[in-house]
Image (cartoon, rainbow, N blue to C red):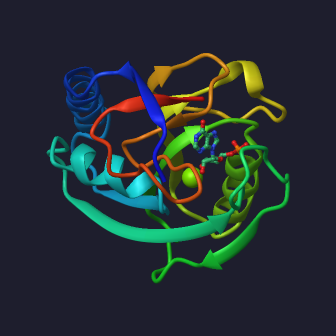
Amino acid sequence: MENEIKMLISEEDVNKRIREIGEQISADYAGKELHVICILKGGVFFMCDLVKHITVPVTHDFMSVSSYGDKTVSSGRIKIIKDLDDSIEGKDVLIVEDIIDSGRTLHHLLQLLRARNPKSVRLCTLLDKPDRREIEVPVDYTGFSIPDLFVVGYGLDYAQHYRNLPYIGVIEG
Ligand code: IMP
Ligand code: MG
């Protein structure tokens, strides 16, 4: 697959912002331990760089939910493809996601995870498209708010391609 990609957020700006969020999270969770839940696959690229800037003790788990398939329009249906390995009961949980669009994925996930009795749940997303929101979700940490564009790179895909781009871009043509 080869498309023209126009840069929206540079690698330098992404890295700088991730460092800032990591420092903020470290300050907010001072004296605590953090259980990071990464939403596969897109969130993994962000999570790996983010946790390097977190100075409190961190444990990790991964979850995979289906949302878009190979289309660029949300189906609105969400299915758990891979559940967590470990219990989150009594833990301070931080969900790490690549992007919040309609909010449906995170709304569903938050309900599901809160029912498992964590001590707390917060949400961290690299990107947010607030204009597209259909269901309100409480976002605690946002890398960048972006306009209503379909973006790729830094974990975000178009039909599974472009996740490995070190910057955030928009497909042209
Ligand atoms: P939501 O349930 O509509 O909030 O969808 C969130 C999911 O849709 C994200 O985790 C992404 O996997 C996908 N998604 C939303 N917008 C984009 C985009 O611009 N590029 C790539 N994936 C996107
Ligand atoms: Mg995703």
The one nearer the camera, 105 or 170, is 170
* Residue 35 percent location from the top left of the image: 37, 61
Q: Residue at x 16, y 41 (%)?
A: 53
Residue 168 in the image, given as x and y percentages of width and height: 40, 31
Q: Quadrant of ligand 1?
A: top right
The quadrant where residue 68 appears: bottom right
The quarter of the rendered structure image containing the C terminus is top right
Q: Does the rendering let one see residue 140?
A: no
121 left or right of 48?
Answer: right
8 lies above or below 155:
above
Residue 76 placement, left or right of 165: right
Spot occupied by residue 121 in the image (x, y as percentages of width and height): 54, 50
How many numbered markers are drawn?
Answer: 0
Residue 128's place in the image compared with 53, above or below, is above
Q: Residue at x 61, y 16 (%)?
A: 147
**Residue 105 showing in the rendered view:** yes
